[in-house]
């Protein structure tokens, strides 16, 4: 009797082990979908809005900067591969940016062993960006490696706003307007020449001025220091016979 009981326990244990083993080796059978990662996952896995479009301006960049590389993450829903897989990326005809003039994009791959990879868009600082904004709309399309079954999802039931997984819009320009951190009562009328001269002389990051007054580098004591420095610099230059003028021919001044 004891022998039968022991054999029954062993048999049941074997069945359970076999069942678990079958569950563990179940494989992913669907196609491998390619999609824009930021439409599903917040950038850097932090609390941030999901996006299928974004934009930037060269306006606050130093004039020496002639291009930027903008990185857009893409992700695979499916199996990883031990070989590089090419991604089919096309430029939507609604784009106003011109390849070779405003941007360039190398061939795009999901590299071996990667679930997430990157589209690197080089945006050129073209002269016509000073007066015009441009858009670049990218479409992911199916090829021999990937499908695009993840089309879009509704993200706001009230407005019926949707988020696209396979379409991404990038906007850019080079328009320079008075930034939020420029405090005119202390720094005077905003001009591009004065702004970049001040940043160069004091080694300030121009992008810092995109913040509001009171942020790091833009507290009242710091702005007063910038005012005093520039006022003394302009006075010294004028005294030495090298008056600094704005682009319109008027003398550069600080209140």
Image (cartoon, rainbow, N blue to C red):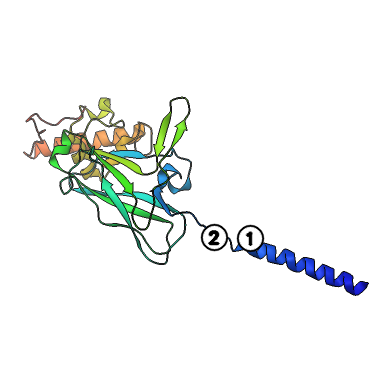
State the image quarter where residue 234 is shown: top left
Does any portion of residue 243 appear in the rendered image? Answer: yes
Residue at the spot x=59%, y=63% of the render? 25
Instruction: Estimate the x, y position of residue 146 in percent, counting from the top left.
Output: 38, 54
Q: Is residue 57 above or below residue 72?
A: above
State the image quarter where residue 59 is shown: top left
Classify the position of the C terminus by image quarter.
top left
As drawn, the label of residue 23 is 1
Q: Mark 2 = which residue?
A: 27
Q: Secondary structure at mark 2?
A: loop
Pick the front one: 90 or 31: 31
State the image quarter where residue 170 is shown: top left
Does any portion of residue 65 appear in the rendered image? Answer: no
Residue at the spot x=42%, y=46% of the render? 149
Pick the front one: 82 or 3: 3
Classify the position of the N terminus by image quarter.
bottom right
Q: Is residue 127 above or below residue 161?
A: below
Instruction: Estimate the x, y position of residue 31 in percent, counting from the top left.
Output: 44, 54
């Amino acid at each position: 009797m004891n022998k039968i009981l022991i054999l029954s326990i062993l048999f049941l244990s074997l069945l359970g082990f076999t069942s678990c083993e079958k569950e563990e080796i179940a494989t992913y059978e669907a196609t491998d979908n390619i999609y824009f990662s930021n439409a599903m996952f917040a950038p850097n896995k932090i609390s941030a809005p999901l996006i299928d479009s974004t934009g930037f301006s060269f306006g606050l960049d130093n004039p020496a900067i002639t291009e930027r590389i903008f990185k857009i993450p893409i992700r695979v829903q499916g199996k990883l591969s031990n070989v590089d897989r090419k991604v089919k990326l096309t430029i939507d005809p609604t784009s106003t940016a011109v390849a070779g003039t405003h941007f360039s994009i190398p061939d795009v791959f999901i590299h071996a062993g990667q679930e997430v990879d990157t589209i690197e868009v080089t945006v050129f600082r073209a002269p016509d960006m000073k007066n015009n904004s441009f858009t670049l709309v990218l479409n992911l399309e199916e090829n021999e490696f990937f499908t695009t079954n993840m089309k879009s999802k509704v993200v706001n039931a009230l407005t019926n706003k949707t988020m696209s997984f396979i379409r991404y819009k990038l906007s850019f320009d080079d328009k320079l307007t008075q930034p939020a951190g420029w405090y005119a009562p202390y720094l005077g009328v905003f001009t591009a020449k004065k702004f970049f001269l001040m940043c160069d002389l004091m080694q300030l990051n121009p992008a810092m001025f995109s913040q509001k007054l009171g942020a790091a580098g833009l507290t009242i004591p710091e702005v007063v220091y910038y005012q005093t420095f520039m006022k003394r610099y302009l006075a010294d230059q004028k005294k030495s016979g090298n008056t600094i003028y704005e682009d319109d021919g008027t003398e550069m001044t600080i209140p």
